[in-house]
Amino acid sequence: MRTVYLVLAFCLLQGVEGYSLHQETQLHANLTTKYDRKIRPYQNQTEPIQISMDFYMEKLKEFSEQENKISVVGSLSIEWKDFRLTWDPTDYDGDLNQTSLFVSDIWAPNLFLLNPYEKQTPILSDGTACTIQSNGYVTCLLADNFETTCSADISNYPFDTQICTLKFYVQGSFASNTLLQNASSTIRLDLYEIHGLWYLTGTPLRGERSFKLIFSKVASSVVIASGVSSAAANSTEENIYVDIMTENYAEFGKSTERFPIVPEISIRSFTFRVTEIALGLVAFLAVIVCIILGSMVSSGVDNGSNSPSTSAQVGQNQLCVSPPCLKSASYVVSNLNTSVKPCDNFYKYACGRFKIENPLDFGFLI
């Protein structure tokens, strides 16, 4: 019985054949002989070559308001078809379905990041290895830390929204020759890893070829309002909206017939929202402070009536115990209603939204 098993195993092994090093070397020679990497791989040169792009999100690494920079860690997959890089696997023992070639050996789009934080460098270098399928499809996968400029807008701080973009374009190609497009209907999360400070809360669909990632971060902060210094929050919730969308761009504002279509990765980030619990605590602390101030004013009245004072002290006490001052303090305390929502009515002045043109009116108390 054991002999039968050995014979069967031998027969099965005899039926399994694999391509050899010599066969793959021969395939590379056949593919690259008389191959001109400067010519766009399309039979009809009047039609654009389609280049598909997928973005694999790994994490949002950094957003710097001081440096006006955003840093995204991810992988960019680029795919196109080259009819010159096709072969019949049966000519190579039947199982040589794919191989690898360097960008220096084949035509590849001269892809650049349009708005890098530092200098522009090609996305695909000559040393990048790409996978070639027997049907001619070429796939290049580049993992990198994508850094781009992003001007911080703090005009509505701490409720501001930052919009950052990653823009790609093909250098040295006409718009009629190159068509960049998103390969899938959503950002790919196959490689996503949870970050210690950031967490992914969703990837809702925003529209055709437009997608959103929402990240949230909790960090301590102190809000300084215009004219008012207030520990307005013990925690600030920071949301980051990441969109990928495809739009058309004309390089340097010239004719779109001359320059390529640019897919844009747009990152909307950092919408600050002060939590209601934190503002409730602020309102409570404000009430306590007002009560303490009231007690100090009352103590000043008693001390002023029971002890002799100089003319300067009398003038100072008159400022502290004057009816308008006491009425104003009473007005502030009576209006600190903790049942209302934060940032409504009086509490909007504790949220960093103080407006000089709309101050509290104490004139009727005088």
Image (cartoon, rainbow, N blue to C red):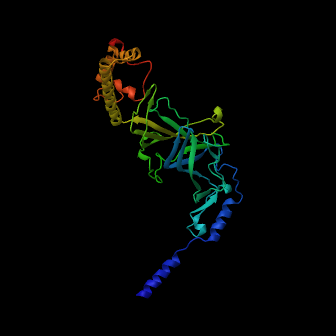
Along the line of sight, the residue nearer the viewer: 344 or 148: 344
Residue 314 sits above or below residue 6 on the image: above
Residue 239 sits above or below residue 283 on the image: below
Along the line of sight, the residue nearer the viewer: 58 or 302: 302
| Residue that extends furthest to the front in the rendered view of this protein | 308
Viewed as shown, does residue 365 lie left or right of 263?
left
Q: Position of residue 183 (x, y in %)?
A: 51, 47
- Residue sitting at 57 percent across and 44 percent down? 147
Residue 177 sits above or below residue 318 on the image: below
Q: Position of residue 170 (x, y in %)?
A: 63, 43
Q: Quadrant of residue 24?
A: bottom right
Q: Position of residue 326 (x, y in %)?
A: 32, 18
Along the line of sight, the residue nearer the viewer: 251 or 303: 303
Q: Quadrant of the C terminus?
A: top left
Q: Position of residue 236 (x, y in %)?
A: 41, 38
Q: Quadrant of residue 347?
A: top left
- Residue sitting at 52 percent across and 74 percent down? 16
